[in-house]
Amino acid sequence: MADQSEKKLRTKEDDEVSGRDGEAVSPELPVGIITDILVRLPVKTLLRFKCVSRPWRSLISDPSFASSFLARSLARPAVASLVSISDLSQPVPSLYQFFRLDHQTGLSAPVPLPDMPSETVKISEGIHGFVCLDAGGLTRVCNPSTREVAALPLTSPDFPDDLQGEISSFAALGYDPASKQYKVLKTWILYSPYGGVAAAHKVLTLATDSWRTVDDCPVKFPWDDCISEEGAIHILTRDSMKGNIVGTLDLATEKFRMLLLPEGVRAVKVELKLFRGHLALLECRRLWDDDTITMYVLDDYGSRAWKELRMVLPRFS
């Protein structure tokens, strides 16, 4: 079997470079060595190499190769970041521009987004270089660096027929390391003309066509922030009665749970962040009084214990 696998990776050029007696001029490399070389290459180079031959395309497209490439990429120090900036000149900042920021030179270069047939496109926090774009009924997952786009199947919320009103939608992409699958969470918020609010939630596993309904979700209002990390999607929203709340979708079980927030942050403006791989809440209400920013870091998901960190910034002279 090993010999057959190695022969499959012979390129078209290898077949042509042979002697008259049919013997290859250069020896073939084992599959393991070729894989070890390829996982060290940039994404754009791999995309070009997929055109070398069908066996190479099959190897680079294989899920096990993608897992090895991802693990190696996450272990390397970041040399560049993907930065998104919204157009603040718009009444509702929704038009985003992506930039690739080089950490060594400090220079940035624009990265074009795929065209979406809507002026209002919501872009979720990225994970592993992928972002989720949502525009009404359309949802896309794309890699801005390679401009590859996956169009997700159309779906709609399961609101009762007698419930009418204006509907807005939000979508987020997450990664489940247990199943090694990417999943998209989509939420619809319906505003009734009589003052009521309703919500519906669905989940889709990428490379499938079936959306699944998520029940018993605590998120009933539009998202303020959304953070995806290994195995979960965290949503910060603001309940008109309870103040700030955070709902966490476990991507393995596809079930929601509430995070109990630290004392004193439910009624103040906070932002959801990732700090050294941990979920964090950032609040700046004391910034203008004593130059202090407070961060609450969730060190232990099991006990849901938050650690308070205070940072005093230098005053402007």
Image (tube, rainbow, N blue to C red):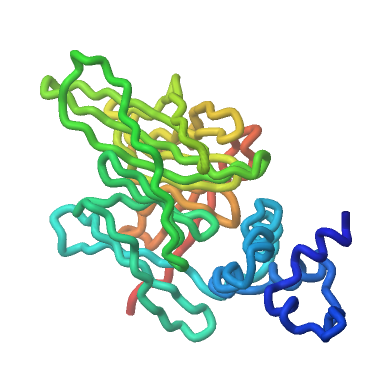
**Relative to 170, is 7 on the left or the right?**
right
Left or right placement of residue 305 versus residue 126 in this view: right
In percent of width and height, residue 40 lies at 69, 72
- In x, y percent, where is residue 59? 68, 60
Relative depth, front residue between 206 and 284: 206
- Which percent across, then down, holds residue 29? 83, 73
Question: In the displayed structure, does residue 42 sit left or right of residue 106?
Answer: right
Image side of residue 184 versus residue 30, left or right: left
Q: Residue furthest front?
A: 20
Q: Position of residue 283 (x, y in %)?
A: 39, 50
Which residue is found at the position 51% from the left and 44% from the top?
174
Q: Is residue 39 visible?
A: yes
Instruction: Determine the image quadrant of residue 39.
Output: bottom right
Quadrant of the snapshot with the C terminus = bottom left
Q: Residue at x 71, y 58 (%)?
A: 68
Q: What count of labels does the image hold?
A: 0
- Rendered residue at 16%/64% (across/down): 89
For the residue pair 124 and 257, the one nearer the viewer reads as 124
Q: Nearer the viewer, residue 9 or 85?
A: 9
Check the image and report above or below for 191 versus 120: above
- The structure residue drawn at horizontal position 88% and vertical position 54%, both measured from the top left corner, is 1
Picture layout, residue 141 above or below residue 255? below
